Image: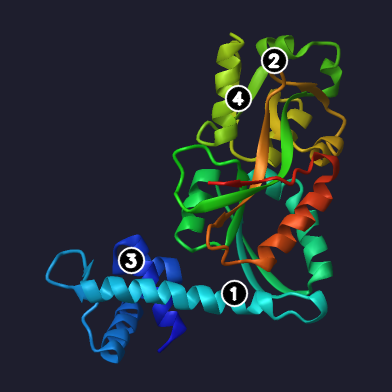
Amino acid sequence: MSLRALRTLLAIARHGSFARAADAVHLTQSAVSLHVRALEQEFDAVLFDRTRRIPVLTDAGRRAVERAQQILDLYDGIAGELGEGGELHGRLRIGAINTTLAGILPAALAVLRERHPRVRVLVHSGMSAELAARVDAGELDAAVTTEPVKPHPAGLVHAGLYREGFWVIAPPELGGSDAATLLRDHPFIRFDRHAWAGRTIDAELRRLRLDVQTSMELDSLQAIVHMVASRLGVAVVPLSERTRAALPGLVCLPFGAPQLERKVVLLEREDRRAGRLAQALAEAIRLEAGGAAIHEKNLG
């Protein structure tokens, strides 16, 4: 029995078709079909009803998926439990929102590599809701996201990492103005409203009855900061203390009354497949976050 074939079986169950599963596991559709046939021969059971346009799991197929998940959970957890002298090793697949990629995460990954050089980390970017779905599907072991907003997948847990405040940023020559004046009187570089941060900013602007002159809408914190530094407008962005301290001489004023903030968390499945590897990553992130770090754990 091939572990890769079991992963293929799970991918079909999660994505609903052989074609989408092939994309998820980076195989051709014919290779996916071969994996399924090999499992059916080995189990001496039909796993999919192929009389329908879209293959549907049989009763035997559903039991096979359940057992395959248990087997892979056990296998994936072995490496993280066998480190000698406290050293960990294995693979950790994580997702991260854009602001952490442009802020704390690179330094935290460097700390993790120094402490545990045998841990291999694979990083994927995305928005919080998308990353939560991928953790739930088993495509990622954990994700650094904003605190989940309901509705979100059941069976996920999150541990607090650090907080980010929302700040109005502007070119240095506009330093004599208050936040409301900056937002009303200058071109506004908007944080993408498909993201939770963008929707939060938009809601607070409406609550404060601030009309802005949107000149562009971007989903990258780095791009927004560069645009503001190039004197193309003002913006509202979430920033950790570390990231804010590194801004290139920009005006930085609290946004909201009281100032808005959000919690950044490490999101995992409740069965904690990544175990000690994810915990080591969380510790490295909190170390880099310094005074903004938070340590409470919340069940999803």
List x then y, in percent, for residue 61.
Answer: 27, 74
> Which quarter of the picture shows residue 118?
bottom right
Q: Secondary structure at mark 2?
A: loop
**Tag 1 residue:** 77
Judge from the rendering whether residue 295 lies leftward or rightward of residue 148; answer left or right: right
Find disc 2 in the rendering and name its residue. 257
Q: Are marks 2 and 4 in contact (CB under 8 Å)?
A: no
As measured in the structure, the alpha-carbon distance from the residue carrying label 1 to the one carrying label 3 is: 22 Å
Label 4, secondary structure: give it: helix
Q: For the residue marked with disc 4, what is the amino acid?
A: Ile
Q: Which residue is mark 4?
A: 201
Q: Residue at x 82, y 61 (%)?
A: 111
Cα separation, mark 3 vs mark 2, equals 47 Å
Pinpoint residue 13: horizontal percent, then vertical percent: 33, 66
**Separation of disc 1 and disc 4 at Cα?**
39 Å
The numbered mark at residue 13 is: 3
Where residue 42 is drawn, which disc sits there?
A: none
> Who comes first in sequence, dot 1 or dot 3?
3
| Total numbered labels | 4
Q: Residues within 10 Å of mark 4 (few under 14, many from 20)?
A: many
The amino acid type found where label 1 is placed reads Gly
